[in-house]
Image (cartoon, coloured by chain):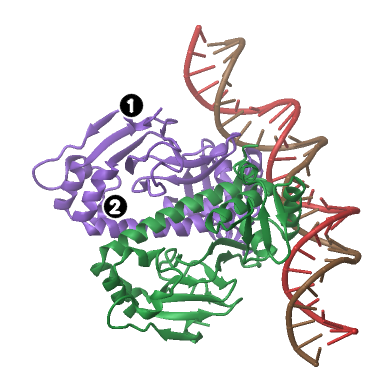
Chain colours: A purple, B green, C brown, D red
Amino acid sequence: MQNTIGSLRRAPVNVVAGGVPELCAQCDARHIGLCDALHDDDLHFLASVAQQVSIEKGRGFVTEGDPARQFFNINHGTAKLFKDLPDGRRQITGFVGAGDFIGLAANATYMFGAEALEPVQLCSFDRAELRAVFARFPAIERRLLDVASHELIIAQEQMLLLGRKTAVERVASFLDGWGLRVASCQGGATRLDLPMTRNDLAEYLGLTVETISRALATLRKQGVVAVGADHVISILNPARLTAIGQAEG
Amino acid sequence: MQNTIGSLRRAPVNVVAGGVPELCAQCDARHIGLCDALHDDDLHFLASVAQQVSIEKGRGFVTEGDPARQFFNINHGTAKLFKDLPDGRRQITGFVGAGDFIGLAANATYMFGAEALEPVQLCSFDRAELRAVFARFPAIERRLLDVASHELIIAQEQMLLLGRKTAVERVASFLDGWGLRVASCQGGATRLDLPMTRNDLAEYLGLTVETISRALATLRKQGVVAVGADHVISILNPARLTAIGQAEG
DNA sequence: CGCGTGACTTGATCTGGATCAAGGTGGCGC
DNA sequence: GCGCCACCTTGATCCAGATCAAGTCACGCG
């Protein structure tokens, strides 16, 4: 498949006369990520070169090695980015959600694959057209540099995790980090609704499914987390979780 | 120590009337990295806000957690970037040489440490002043975005290595990658003059010194490389080395 | 409903790389 | 020259996490 995205359901973004573009108005990412760098008028221009795309759960939408024609900005849902070895070993390099930008780590071709963990909606931008956007709105380019810097920090943190942390430390780091993203507190405990499977977690943390399971069991026995059904994990002792993740205790 | 660089030997870059700035003329990085994005006249402006700094071998010049006041551009020599855990475990996140830019992975404070592996010369730029440079030369900013993108690709490659590759695959990947950087061929064999110790290698590849030693022995016994004295390694069978590093064989 | 399937957990065993231990080698200061 | 020390190698043993195996649970489907 030469260009995965080509066969997906897509629709041009409707642009109304004044105010915020129609589809931007209800976009989860309107006030985070790239679009937040723009005023309403500028947003129209950006929307005019965007294509809204829906991707069903489990569907891949970037294939490593394919020519990198598009950038993506996620509006809704979560996806995983990964790199594979010829024999099937896979390393998930990141999970991306609303407001996140996909496509920086590419030159002529994509250097990673991407797949939706849940139904995903995203805006797709043609790389060539984005050059024009940069010229017109330097703010976008600056923001992109900030995004890239931030991703570099995250990547280095992940190298430390993969190279030097124990299984329990890795799982604790992950839960701690994810907790910061989507903090929805309930009676003192933070409840995480993870979109990924144990297998995804294993491929992200450089471990196996069984080890993830055992590490979670360890944290549960220590009273740090509660493991519920259906990818729900509650953080009972956030301070302890952080300490374990940073290898401080 | 609040600001490591403060106590180092430094000199303002001399700017001559016409042509290329004096110190840029003999700079190893003049035609790679950032400065290549500029014309001679523009280079004068950049040089006027730069400070030349010399760092002796083994000396740290960035401390994680210190306020990030400067960007650096390496002119000569090699340095390691790293992140530490409280108990002393260290992950080297990268080696940087002439033309490489240091300081992208920072927000208010540096999120990594840096130390010279050999005598290093670099240009130091004040972050605040660099804002002005960006405004004047958008080319610099664009180039910086390219650099960041490239570093992201490298970082994801490294995550794959740390999360999924075996010891021998890691060492082969490293040697293969380093070979591409500094290809100096001699009678068919590429001769690598590594600036780092086995211990640095171990901290970069998520292994121990002993394992590095054993992996090199394995590659040597297979006739893929020759291990010489004083950090010299010759690549005897480049194709095989690449195949092992990519887990294709 | 019974059956198949995919996600998860838990237990038993195995193993790649860590750890512990013992040299070897070369540079450098005295 | 001699001793020290940093760096590297090789061998023996250990162990965290992988692999193999078995079973639970929830869910969709004929």
Name the residue rendered at 59%, 38% in the picture.
A89
Kindly identify which residue carries mark 2: A34
- Residue B16 in the image: above or below residue A195: below
Which residue is more in the foreground, B226 or A178? B226
Residue B156 image point, x, y percent: 50, 49
Q: Distance between the residues labelled 2 and 1?
A: 26 Å
Q: What element carries label 1?
A: helix
- Residue B122 in the image: above or below residue A221: below
Quadrant hosting residue A249: bottom right
Q: How many labels does the image show?
A: 2
Residue A140 image point, x, y percent: 26, 55
Name the residue rendered at 14%, 51% in the picture.
A41
Quadrant hosting residue B67: bottom left
Q: What element carries label 2?
A: helix
The single residue placed furthest to the left in the displayed view is A17
Q: Are circles 2 and 1 on residues that touch, CB within 8 Å? A: no
Amino acid on which disc 1 is placed? Ser
Amino acid on which disc 2 is placed? Leu
Residue B168 image point, x, y percent: 69, 48
Q: Looking at the image, can residue B36 be seen?
A: yes
Within 10 angstroms of label 2, few (less than 14), some, or many (20 or more) residues? some
Left or right of A48: which side holds A75? right
Instruction: Compare marks 2 and 1 and give the one earlier in the sequence.
Output: 1
- Residue A76 in the image: above or below residue B111: above
